């Protein structure tokens, strides 16, 4: 006896329904299945119908078999991270007094949870697709953003396996497209990650994107080629079947549900696209996807860029040439260099010629000793009037904090397209009242108390801060600062001199922190002092100050600090 | 200079003298002198901090409003703090010039910006030299920042004719030349020096600034270029670039080398250049070195004798290390042993009071490049002697630390004989008495070496002169990494490296440094926990002798191993540790 399904048509309602049964013997079915009196069971005696029914039954059996295999796989795949989570949680509980050990366990739990979540998401996706509940959104997006995000997700795994990665774009007709970016990214990331997984370390992976027109739609053509383990002809036929995974002795522990390719195919088809795969065992695989998308001819806002001077510092030849060709296309004024020394030299030229450099497009730097943020920070300090835009393939979320602290205000992602570059620069400069000295910092609606006993220092700070539109109040010593703080006035931050008559900055801060006023513990207090003895910096923190700004005040440092309020 | 500036300089010199005087002689007398020196230097240190707080910091706070005379006095003060031959206080020098640079940028005062860019660049370069050889983002960043300063100042070269001020022109040339000292890229170094050589010999520039010391610029640039001689075979230099290095070597060394009685300090670089260029082979070079070393009189302590007796043996060892397959290796190694023995005899007899800066440099050279191999004295033997010779007041602390470490090891072992068994050579020992001896010896040595990295940093005088500035404190933290790297790379000291690396890390891993130290990954972690406790106790007590050991532990409980504290927090142990601390 084989456990399976029987397909039975209920005559009265004309429905075909599936019953689980122990037997496939049609004559036995009548005896095995009990029906309510209202339903009359009809099983055709017609041979063709009988064959059809049997075929359906066999298909149901195969699907059932696959589901069992899937459940067995899933059971293993879910259990593995779950075991890690349970085991590590227990380990952490047993060593609560050892923070390092607890932190180590939590980190591992985080990784295992992430893996588990992705498994669950894929299963849910598959379920949605099978039940026809998957909806595709259509919203405007920039192609550059989609490609940047796709590569940002895939690159770490690629780096881990030390693959040589080549990325190409060709014949990009429209950069502003309409589609479901979440699902598009899911498709591309899935294919690229498969290449990463199924290619032994130090492999070759090439990804390219291009566009062509078809029936008034812009077809986004994606191609991913690798020299990985490839697929047998037999497996290639089943590659889109759910729950199928390639086995390999050369790649150990390939994780996944076996649902990825199936989901990709369904998603591509839902978007009216096509997917094709060419593969040879031990030679590699090429996946091609074509998805027709709605597009728009995005306007380029280059007006804001007229009469602006742009400096390009980019050591990557391909990106460098591309930036230059786009800037030339829009007839924009620029100077270019590939090194930090070159940039310094060009900025000196501008200064001598009394020319203002409005924008620095900062890409890869050639110097071996320093990093990008050191360069940005230095240039911003030396030329605070210049807007610095980073052009790069980094994940902005990862670097935003450090970038901002270094004076980088905007980011244009790679791969680079003409409109995203031009509009990116324009957006950075769009506000004509943008004050570069303050890095465009807008503190309108914020109130700051400046505590400083020296009149000139107060005036200088006032002048620097005036363009931030901050509501600035002043006090001449710690006591006055304390009195003002304790009044009804609300302040968002206090800039506190340390050495002052009547009450110094430490005492004033301590008094504010212990005042009991609602925001006494949370209001940001920044010390302003030339004293940078490590012990005194620690003392300032102990007194309740959040950080300190060295004196004489450096505009760059002051602005970076105030960005945090 | 203002009175406080003169007083500050006087105090720094006096503190240095006090620390230097406190070395050598009879142990008991030495101990008394050290204690007195420490007390006196502590008073001066407090006075210095007060002088800076009341005067310098106030002045920098209000720099926008101070008079031009006050700024001039600041510059004079900074010039004495660092005059390129004596580094009295590079940190304060840098603080002053960074403040001045900010001021002049605000004022858009181009000439002064150029000058200050040069000065800040020099300050950063000198500050970084104290951690030479330590690979860390901080050291890279300091060198790069210095390079950026010099690059900005030198970018005004194309406006040389338009800048009327000759002094500013000098800073532009100097800045350009100094880019070469900040970069590790050999090709860039050579390119920069070649460019400078062209400029300083170009009549166009000379006529624009006839008052500049062009001959000095020329000599210095050749010297700078010639310093690439030892590594030029490792870079991808073109024929023209190689020729430039050779030309500079000939310019600098040849006249001296061909004198009747050439100075060894010029002769060896000349030989080295000949070897690096392939004019002579390794055997000839080693023979030449042996002659120079053997001919040197070990009773003399002048610069040439010290060079031959102490520096050349280190270079000799480096060449043997790099050339593992030379002929007569056994004979060469025997010679190396004799050369190292001579080096140590001279180093131990060297009158430190006459030249502490030179001795610190020599110490750094030995610590960094000593070649530990079979037949020569071990690195442990050499460094132990040097520590005793140089570390002055700090050595007193390390003696106490050794006693406490030994006491703790013995006490812990008696409570839990398997406590240190993760340490392979301790765990393997079954005889309890022998295990105790091994452990106590190990603990004592770990206590001797935990601050080993500080020896190369030459920060002791600074720390005895005033509080460390924020950036100096970041540099100071690198002593854990530097000490670890040197100890770990030699067989005789590798077992002490972990304690040096982790003795400032907190047990819970949340605070302390370096961030790279992961307690759970080390088999030596139990001893590192002990040394972390010992080093903290000794330092805390040294800073404030009224402190009670129990209070110290209670207030800082989170940083220490709870297992260790559970074993030691009773009156008997605390009392014993307290009495050992008081011996300090």
Image: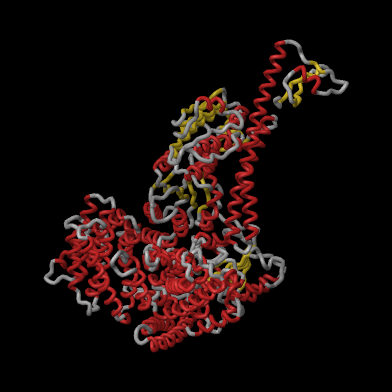
Q: How many numbered dots are placed on residues in this image?
A: 0
Q: Is residue A78 left or right of residue B325?
A: right
Quarter-of-image position of residue B141: bottom left
Q: How is the image coloured?
A: secondary structure
Which residue appears at 52% of the width and 55% of the height? A402
Residue B45 vs residue A475, the one in the foreground? B45
Q: Is residue A37 left or right of residue B159?
A: right
Relative image position of residue A286 (x, y in whole percent): 48, 30
For residue A101, side relative to residue B382 (left or right): right
- Residue B384, percent from left and from top: 37, 74
Quadrant of the rendered structure where residue A71 is?
top right
Percent of width and height locating residue B553: 58, 75
Rendered location of residue B53, percent (x, y): 50, 78
> In front: A311, or B554?
B554
Query: Can residue B23 be seen?
Result: yes
Residue, far left: B260
The reply to whether residue A497 is in sight is no
Residue under the point 45% across and 68% down? B500
Q: Nearer the viewer, residue A26 or A17?
A: A26
Q: Is residue A52 above or below residue B387?
A: above
Q: Residue furthest right?
A: A37
Query: In this view of the protein, which residue sits in the foreground, A63 or B56?
Result: A63
Q: Is residue A542 above or below residue A286?
A: below
Image quarter where the N terminus of chain B lies is bottom left
């Amino acid at each position: 006896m084989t456990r399976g399904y029987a397909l039975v048509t209920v005559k009265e309602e004309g429905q075909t329904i599936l019953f689980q049964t122990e037997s496939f013997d049609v004559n036995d079915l009548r005896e095995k299945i009990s029906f309510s009196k209202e339903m009359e069971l009809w099983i055709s005696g017609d041979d063709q119908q009988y064959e059809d029914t049997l075929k359906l039954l066999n298909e149901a059996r195969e699907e059932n078999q696959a589901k069992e295999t899937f459940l067995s796989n899933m059971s293993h795949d879910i259990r593995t991270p779950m075991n890690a989570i349970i085991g590590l949680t227990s380990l952490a509980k047993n060593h609560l007094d050892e923070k390092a050990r607890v932190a180590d366990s939590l980190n591992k739990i985080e990784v295992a949870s992430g893996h588990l979540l992705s498994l669950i998401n894929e299963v849910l996706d598959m379920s949605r697709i099978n039940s026809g509940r998957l909806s595709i959104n259509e919203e405007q997006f920039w192609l550059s953003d989609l490609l940047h995000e796709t590569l940002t997700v895939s690159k770490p795994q690629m780096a881990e396996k030390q693959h040589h990665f080549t990325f190409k774009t060709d014949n990009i007709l429209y950069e502003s497209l309409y589609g479901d970016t979440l699902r598009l990214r899911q498709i591309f990331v899935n294919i690229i990650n498969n290449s990463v997984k199924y290619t032994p370390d130090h492999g070759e992976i090439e990804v390219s994107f291009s566009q062509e027109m078809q029936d008034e739609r812009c077809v986004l053509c994606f191609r991913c080629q690798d020299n990985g383990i490839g697929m047998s002809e037999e497996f290639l036929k089943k590659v889109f079947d759910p729950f199928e995974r390639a086995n390999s002795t050369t790649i150990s522990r390939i994780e996944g549900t076996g649902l990825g390719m199936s989901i990709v195919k369904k998603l591509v088809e839902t978007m009216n696209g096509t997917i094709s795969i060419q593969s040879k065992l031990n030679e590699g695989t090429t996946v091609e996807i074509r998805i027709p998308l709605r597009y728009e001819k995005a306007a380029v806002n280059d007006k804001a860029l007229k009469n602006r001077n742009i400096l390009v510092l980019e050591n990557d030849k391909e990106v460098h040439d591309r930036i230059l060709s786009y800037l030339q296309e829009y007839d924009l004024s620029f100077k270019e260099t590939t090194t930090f020394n070159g940039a310094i030299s060009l900025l000196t030229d501008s200064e001598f010629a009394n020319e203002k450099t409005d924008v620095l497009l900062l890409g890869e730097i050639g110097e071996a000793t320093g990093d990008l943020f050191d360069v940005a920070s230095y240039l911003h300090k030396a030329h605070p009037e210049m807007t610095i835009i980073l052009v790069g393939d980094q994940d902005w979320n990862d670097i935003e904090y450090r970038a901002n602290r270094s004076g980088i205000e905007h980011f244009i992602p790679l791969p680079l397209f003409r409109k995203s570059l031009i509009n990116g620069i324009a957006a950075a400069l769009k506000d004509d009242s943008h004050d570069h000295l303050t890095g465009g910092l807008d503190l309108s609606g914020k109130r700051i108390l400046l505590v400083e006993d020296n009149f000139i220092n107060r005036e200088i700070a006032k002048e620097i801060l005036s363009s931030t539109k901050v509501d600035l109040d002043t006090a001449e010593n710690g006591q006055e600062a304390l009195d003002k703080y304790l009044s009804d006035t609300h302040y968002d931050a206090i800039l506190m001199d340390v050495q002052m008559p009547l009450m110094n900055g430490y005492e004033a801060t301590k008094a504010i922190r212990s005042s009991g006023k609602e925001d006494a513990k949370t209001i940001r207090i920044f010390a302003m002092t030339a004293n940078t003895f490590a012990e005194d910096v620690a003392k300032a923190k102990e007194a309740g100050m959040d950080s300190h700004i060295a004196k004489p005040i450096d505009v760059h440092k002051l602005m970076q600090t105030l960005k945090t309020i | 200079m203002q009175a406080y500036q003169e007083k500050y300089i006087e105090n720094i010199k006096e503190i240095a003298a006090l620390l230097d005087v406190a070395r050598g002689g009879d142990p008991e007398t030495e101990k008394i002198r050290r204690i007195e020196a420490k007390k006196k230097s502590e008073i001066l240190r407090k006075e210095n901090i007060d002088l800076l707080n009341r005067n310098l910091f106030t002045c920098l706070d209000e720099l926008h409003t101070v008079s031009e005379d006050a700024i001039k006095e600041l510059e004079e003060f900074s010039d004495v703090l660092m005059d390129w031959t004596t580094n009295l206080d590079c940190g304060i020098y840098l603080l002053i010039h960074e403040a001045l640079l900010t001021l002049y940028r605000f004022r858009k005062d181009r000439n002064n910006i150029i000058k200050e860019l040069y000065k800040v660049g020099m300050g950063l370069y000198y500050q970084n030299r104290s951690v030479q050889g330590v690979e860390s983002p901080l050291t890279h960043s300091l060198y790069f920042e210095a390079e950026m300063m010099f690059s900005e100042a030198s970018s005004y070269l194309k406006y040389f004719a338009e800048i009327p001020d000759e002094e500013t022109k000098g800073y532009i040339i100097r800045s350009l030349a100094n880019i070469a000292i900040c970069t590790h890229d050999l090709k860039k170094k050579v390119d920069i020096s070649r460019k400078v050589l062209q400029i300083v010999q170009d009549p166009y520039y000379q006529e624009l600034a006839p008052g500049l010391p062009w001959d000095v610029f020329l000599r210095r640039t050749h010297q700078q270029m010639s310093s690439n001689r030892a590594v030029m075979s490792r870079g991808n230099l073109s024929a023209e670039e190689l020729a430039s290095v050779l030309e500079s070597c000939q310019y600098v060394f040849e006249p001296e080398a061909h004198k009747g009685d050439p100075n060894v300090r010029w002769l060896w670089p000349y030989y080295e250049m000949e070897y690096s260029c392939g004019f002579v082979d390794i055997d000839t070079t080693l023979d030449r070195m042996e002659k120079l070393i053997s001919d040197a009189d070990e009773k003399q302590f002048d610069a040439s004798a010290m060079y031959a007796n102490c520096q050349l043996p280190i270079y000799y060892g480096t060449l043997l290390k790099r050339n593992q397959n030379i002929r007569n290796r056994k004979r060469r190694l025997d010679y190396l042993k004799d050369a190292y023995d001579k080096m140590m005899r001279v180093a131990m007899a060297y009158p430190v009071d006459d030249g502490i800066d030179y001795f610190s440099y020599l110490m750094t050279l030995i610590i960094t490049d000593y070649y530990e191999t079979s037949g020569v004295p071990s690195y442990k033997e050499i460094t132990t002697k040097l520590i005793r010779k140089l570390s002055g007041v700090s050595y007193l602390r390390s003696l106490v630390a050794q006693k406490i470490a030994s006491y703790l090891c013995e006490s812990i072992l008696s409570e839990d004989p398997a406590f240190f068994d993760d340490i392979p050579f301790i765990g393997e020992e079954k005889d309890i008495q022998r295990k105790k001896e091994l452990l106590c010896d190990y603990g004592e040595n770990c206590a001797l070496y935990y601050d080993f990295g500080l020896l190369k940093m030459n920060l002791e005088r600074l720390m005895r002169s005033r509080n460390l500035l924020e950036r100096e404190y970041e540099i100071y933290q690198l002593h854990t990494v530097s000490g670890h790297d040197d100890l770990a790379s030699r067989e005789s000291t590798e077992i002490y490296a972990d304690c040096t690396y982790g003795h400032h890390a907190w047990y819970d891993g949340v605070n302390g440094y370096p961030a790279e130290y992961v307690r759970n990954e080390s088999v030596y972690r139990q001893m590192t926990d002990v040394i972390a406790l010992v080093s903290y106790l000794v330092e805390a007590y040294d800073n404030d002798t009224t402190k009670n050991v129990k209070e110290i532990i209670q207030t800082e409980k989170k940083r220490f191993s709870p297992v260790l504290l559970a074993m030691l927090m009773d009156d008997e142990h605390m009392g014993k540790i307290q009495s050992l601390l008081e011996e300090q």
